[in-house]
Image: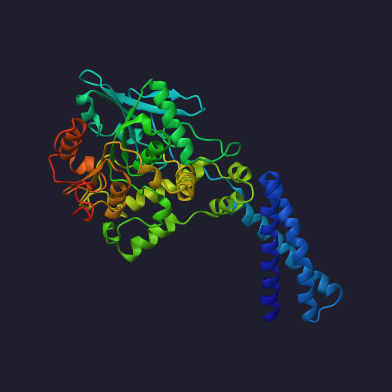
Amino acid sequence: MRSLVLSLLALAAAALVALATFLSFAWFGLPFATLAALALVAFLAVAIPLLRRVAARQGLVGGARRKRVIAWSAGATVAYVVLAHTLVGRTPTPKLAPPEPAPGTRFWTLANGSRLAYVVTEARVPRTGQAIVLHDGPGVPALPLLQRLPSRPYDFLADHGYDVYYYDQLGSGLSSRIDLGREPPYTVRRHVEDLEEIRRTLGARQLFLVGEGWGASLAVQYLVRHPDRVAKMLLVSPAPLWYGAWPEYLDPAARARIGDVEATALALLQRPTLRLILGRMMEDFNPRVAHAIVKDWEADGWWTRAQEEALRLGQPRLTCSSELPSGLLPLTGLGFFAHSYTLRDAQRLADPRPALGRIAVPVLVVRGSCDYIDWRVSYEYLTALPGARYVAIPAAGHLVWYDQPRLLAEVAAAFVRNEALPLEFYDPSRAPRSAPRQ
């Protein structure tokens, strides 16, 4: 029994060396088969001497020792090859269908190389400007969902003279993806550059930005870099203004109660496959090799299944009730790498609040009373932006346009027309020492 344990420990040590060899040689951009072969050589180079020592401790000599070492080495090699091919080397079959273009879908081919899909609702009265809707996520596109809705959520702005543009951000939906095997990964700055290129393409002097969730964070980053090119901002259910200050920003009360069986099933779905884990480890050594092995669609498939199940179980709830918005599922066009790389970059950005304190752009922050994002996240926008006001929409969750479309339209219309808001609002310039009531 002791000999068996020692032999297994020897193989485990050799496996660790093989993994280190695999990751180290990934620096040189070698294909998977070559890396696996080098790892096998390293595995045997360590395993054989250790197995000899185990056999010697057992008292085996000569031919008996040699047979024992050969048998263990051969068995370990077969197991290594089978496991490497089955768990890591075998590329899974794609199971997700790409999103279908909705009627009226157009594309911007921007000067920085991005190709972005968009739809537009043109102004129904004399044009006063362009409104750009920045969707939530990142990596969760807008267009696949919009074509399943009876109407687009911010089309009411067309009644106030705005051409309303909805687009899929780079890396998701019908828009192009970055070739991560050749190009730098997604960054907040790249998304900001895309938005600026959109402005130039439209020939607009200033934009009216409508940001939902992560889209609000993106709108603020654009404002910091181009303060003179933003006319107004409507920020709905905003995600953190500065992610570096909010490692966790979800309200625990916004999660539905689920049983142990459901929680276990969800945890299993959210656990990455060994291929994805290996790709993440290789990314620290050579991202190009990592993305040559793990393709976008593979990571998207795993993430999409996990997100769908989480939404079905109310983790978190998108509305005030446990009701899942109709038309939301199935999720299509999700971009996992756009999501993970963008958020990782957002965590590393400098604090934008000092710069925002010098920018006086009219901003309306709208939050549903039972949004799953902590209300203090929205409040931070008020303390950072001198021209911001805040309205809490009753009986609305994260998707305010789903729970309370009429109230959202009325509040936003009053903001656009510079009229008194139809709901009680909080203006920090009038009450600087108190927080908004929830």
Residue drawn 33% across and 24% down? Answer: 103
Measured along the vertical axis of the image, is residue 377 above or below residue 53?
above
Residue drawn 28% across and 51% down? Answer: 379
Measured along the vertical axis of the image, is residue 280 above or below residue 209?
below
- Res. 160 visible in picture: yes
Q: Residue furthest top?
A: 126
Q: Tell me: 305 left or right of 71.
A: left
Q: Tell me: 88 left or right of 110.
A: right
Q: Nearer the viewer, residue 435 or 414?
A: 435
Residue drawn 80% across and 82% down? Answer: 59
What colour scheme has been applied to the protein in the rendered image?
rainbow
Q: Position of residue 264 (x, y in %)?
A: 39, 62
Q: Nearer the viewer, residue 317 or 198?
A: 198
Residue drawn 23% across and 29% down? Answer: 157
Q: Position of residue 202 (x, y in %)?
A: 38, 21
Q: Quadrant of the N terminus?
A: bottom right
Q: Position of residue 123 (x, y in %)?
A: 24, 21
Measured along the vertical axis of the image, is residue 55 above or below residue 108?
below
Q: Position of residue 28 (x, y in %)?
A: 71, 45
Q: Tell me: 26 left or right of 166.
A: right
Q: Nearer the viewer, residue 12 or 165?
A: 165
Q: Quadrant of the C terminus?
A: bottom left
- Dividing the picture into quadrants, the one containing residue 141 is top left
- Res. 331 visible in picture: no
